[in-house]
Image (cartoon, rainbow, N blue to C red):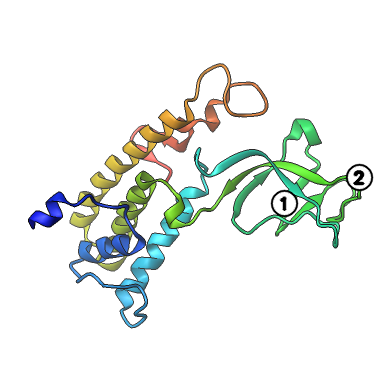
Amino acid sequence: MSLKAQTTAQGRTTLMDAVNICLENIGELPVENLDNEQIQDARIAQRTVLEVHKEGQSKGWSWNTEYAYPFERDLLTSEIKIPKEVVQFSVNRFAYNGRYQLRGSKVYDLLNRTTIFPDTMESLEADVIWLLSWDDVPEAYNRWATIRAARIFSDRTLGSEALFKYTLNDEVAAQSELERIENEQEAPNMLTGVYSFPTYRPADGLMGRRAGAGYSIF
């Protein structure tokens, strides 16, 4: 390692870094950009990284989850449209009696069986999980997504059990660090949480992401 590399502060893991880690994991040379569509392994690696990145976010974290987020009614169509970046949408059943749900990109009124809302209803609040871009999520998450993608990519490409076992250990370590940071940031407790309904729900907590000891549902 050069002296310059040792003394220069390293930046965040980029999407190209993640793709190159996947390629190096199967013994391929890294790429200098992601615009070359002719390199098939690089295209597959990038698709795998983004697949894992999206999959993990859909489970919900403190940094991509918002509660009682207001969505306004469109004045022209009288519909409440939800952005495509929302991967999970749920209204407060105690406030709306389970009346509204998301269908496609629009809120559906189960009582009136329509997506058209009256002028008296200017907005609707819902708990949502956002799908964020690579640069908008914490570094610990990108690190975990990179290692998991590298494991999946090598297993799909080479089917090497040796590589699978080696990178699985790295993935477990990265996931543990990610969960530690999440636990510190979310600060769950047994009395109240961040939910609008003041009760403790263990199944929705951090440990709910595990199906059992030694097994992760990621």
Left or right relative to 211: residue 13: left
Q: Residues within 10 Å of mark 2 (few under 14, many from 20)?
A: few
* Residue indicated by mark 1: 102
Residue 2 in percent (x, y) is at 8, 58
User: x%, y% of residue 36?
Assistant: 34, 80
Query: The N terminus appears in which quarter of the rendering?
Result: bottom left
Relative to 21, say whether 186 is above or below.
Answer: above
- Name the element at disc 1: strand
State the residue in front, 171 or 18.
18
The quadrant holding residue 158 is bottom left
Q: What's the amino acid at mark 1?
A: Leu
Number of numbered discs: 2
Task: Kindly identify which numbered label has been placed on residue 120.
Answer: 2
Q: Amino acid at mark 2?
A: Thr
Left or right of 107? Residue 90 is left
**Mark 1, other Cα within 10 Å: few <14 / some 14–19 / many ≥20:** some
Q: Nearer the viewer, mark 1 or mark 2?
A: 2
Whole-Å distance between the Cαs marked 1 and 2?
A: 20 Å
